[in-house]
Amino acid sequence: MFVLGSSAMMSWVFAKSINNASVLSAKYGIVGGFGYCAWYLSFVGSSVVIYRLRLKGYFSLPHMIFDRYGRWAQLLYCMANFYRLYTEVWSNTMTVSDFYGSRVESDKDYDRDWWTSNLLGLSIPLAYVFMGGMKSSIVSDAVQGTFTIAFLFIVLIYMTAMKDDNKYLNKHLEDNYVGSSWEVYNPVPSRAMLSLDGGMDLLAGGAVQGLLSYPFFDPVLTDRAFLTDPRTMARSFMIGGTFAGFIILCFGFLGIYGSMLGNCVNDGVCPESDLNGAILADVKAGKPFAVAKTMGETVLFLTAFIMILSSISTLDSTFTSTAKLLGPDMSGLWSWLNDIVTGKVSIRASTRGESIQKYMPLAMSEATDRHVWVGRLGMILMALIGTLPIMECPTQLSATTISGTVVMGLGAPIYMIGLLPDSWLWTRGTKRPLAFCTSFIFCAMMGICYQVRYSTKVSYYAKFSPVLSDTQHSNTPYVHGATASCEPIISFSPPFTTHPAISQIHLSKGLRRKS
């Protein structure tokens, strides 16, 4: 139970999640930290639903979806999972690389140190899970979790001592805010903490999606729910989820401290030497690498080490889930697609009778050497395509993904099968593909439209940014994105309420022609 609980915990202590929890806490105070922790109710939702599904005889979510909804529903679900795993690669390696390198604005790329750390952080977990599989991932998660908790407490103790010893900071907090304690600090005193503007919308949205939809979109989490007996799994997930949420909340205090110190320096009360060479804007925003830098090289090293551990643990879980997805989970789909190509079966062929056994997913215990090698090749493929977004368009990675919208269509078709008695459902073996595909496709289209709409706004802003005033800049959308993993927690300011005047647009076009 300890090993599985530790693995479940570390599989959700993403490097990107640490960054997001810190940034949200810097913006909303302790409410931002709890708002991000609300997503960790996914452990409760997944353990309860999958416990019920396992009692009904299912050995994986693809197995249940195939049995209840058919091949097309399983294919859509597997495609969605592949997309989710793909986004985990670049999002976690980028977060760690920020500790070791920086952006080169001249050619819109990153420097050599940044790329070196990125590729090393990608290669190390790929190497050991390529050889050891999911067992190596689970065992290493237990070790990584122990170091993460130990180093995190050292950082928090040191940070608290620095805050208490800084008389200028404490005076600034007492004079301009409700108080100097962590739990009452409000970055915007004029904004009520327990309000929608104060971050309560994040808390409510995270709780709803965490309980009802988000956990079923994460194969890293759900794969572990089928490894032991149901009772042990449920206990492990409850304990692991509690610790994971607690760790994320603790990293929120890092962002709160950054906001406190950044505002103090910005207001001229604290000396700039308190930044210790860190960029003021990054410290105010609660970026972990910047806040850690203000506390010295030792804390920066410990924070970077924690981020490395969390990134590696996430990536090794991502690669093992990729191997399971492309191997045992999709083995029946590969056979079906092969038979379609060779003309042995029609696309509209029934899934009844013998074809059920031929095309259904396999349990991990039934995997052969062929499935193992398909999974290993899938790991390499995932590592390659997961890095391409950075190479092709590093400036676009902060854009929102469609994942947060897609998950809305995945929850109900899964948890209703688990929670409702079989007597209330259709006969086992009978397929109802529209019951799954309708909600999934509808939400996927919503997500795609939302992504296109956001991208259009970003392009519009980029086109006219040279002629926009500072006031107009403040109306551009900001995004707190978890990669596509945890799926993004998104907050928008009023989008483009002020547009450039016609004369300004003509002027900008004339300047481009002359240049």
Image (cartoon, rainbow, N blue to C red):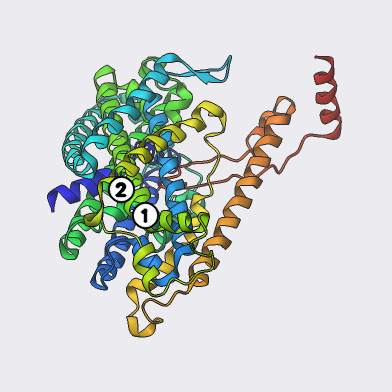
Residue placed farthest to the bottom in the image? 423
The answer to which quarter of the image holds residue 474 is top right
Q: Point out the tag, 2 or 1, that comes first from the N-terminus.
A: 1
Q: Mark 1 is on which residue type?
A: Ser
Q: Is residue 41 left or right of residue 498?
A: left
Q: Which mark is residue 134?
A: none
Quadrant assignment for the C terminus: top right
Rendered residue at 30%/46% (across/down): 370
Spot occupied by residue 133 in the image (x, y as percentages of width and height): 24, 41
Spot occupied by residue 397 in the image (x, y as percentages of width and height): 52, 34
Foreground pick, 371 / 13: 371
Residue where numbered disc 2 is placed: 371
The answer to which quarter of the image holds residue 97 is top left
Residue where numbered disc 1 is placed: 331
Spot occupied by residue 422 in the image (x, y as percentages of width and height): 33, 81
Rendered residue at 29%/65% (across/down): 50
Asked if labels 1 and 2 touch by Cβ distance under 8 angstroms, the answer is yes
Quadrant assignment for the N terminus: bottom left
Foreground pick, 450 / 342: 342
Q: Mark 2 is on which residue type?
A: His
Rendered residue at 42%/29% (across/down): 94
* Residue 501 position (above or below residue 192): above
Q: Secondary structure at mark 1?
A: helix
Foreground pick, 450 / 425: 425
Total marks in image:
2
Q: Is residue 470 left or right of residue 214?
A: right
- Asked if residue 223 can be seen in this view, the reply is yes
- Asked if residue 271 can be seen in this view, the reply is no
Spot occupied by residue 350 in the image (x, y as percentages of width and height): 47, 72
The answer to which quarter of the image holds residue 495 is top right
The CA span between labels 2 and 1 is 8 Å
* Residue 164 position (above or below residue 496): above
